[in-house]
Image (cartoon, rainbow, N blue to C red):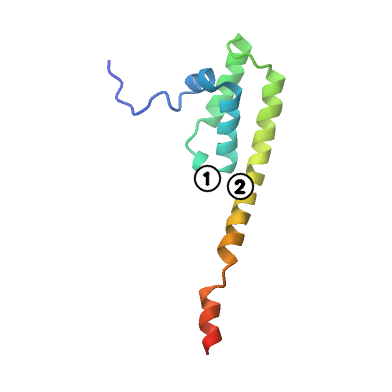
Amino acid sequence: MQNLALLPNAIDPDHLLSSFGLLGLLIIIFAECGLLVGFFLPGDTLLFSAGLLTATGKLDVPLWVQLVTVSIAAILAPFAALFMLALIAVLWFSRRPRAAQITDRA
């Protein structure tokens, strides 16, 4: 049977973990927790699959390393998002607002 899905392996947890390993897991968890574009990523399924692959020996990263690094990525992601939004706000509002220019003419 032909698979008609567009990029079926793009969000398949087993494919992602076998291709990118722990680094891919951390990037996806970071994007899902802190960035707006990460809402469609399979974070929870990926965490379950990572634990399962570690238990079966197919993923060569110790479980304690996964727990520590994923926790750090999930905690740091909102701070990174806050920093990016603060930087955007400073750049956006550093110019004089148009309303202030209009009221100065009167």
At horizontal 61% and vertical 55% (from top left) the residue drawn is: 87
Give the percent coordinates (x, y) of residue 93: 58, 66
* Residue 36, x across and y down, in percent: 52, 45
Q: Which residue is mark 2?
A: 81
Residue 26 in percent (x, y) is at: 60, 30
- Residue sitting at 50 percent across and 19 percent down? 14
Find numbered disc 2 in the image and state the secondary structure of the residue it sits on: helix
Q: Secondary structure at mark 1?
A: helix
Residue at image coords 51%, 39%: 38
Label 2: few (<14), some (14–19) or many (≥20) C-alpha neighbours in 10 Å: some
Residue type, label 2: Ala
Q: Is residue 68 found left or right of 60 in the rendered image?
A: right
Residue reaching furthest to the bottom: 106
Residue drawn at x 46%, y 23% is 12
Q: Which mark is residue 76?
A: none
Which of marks 2 and 1 precedes in the sequence?
A: 1
Q: How many marks?
A: 2
Percent x, y of residue 1 = 27, 15
Label 1 belongs to which residue?
36
Q: Amino acid at mark 1?
A: Leu
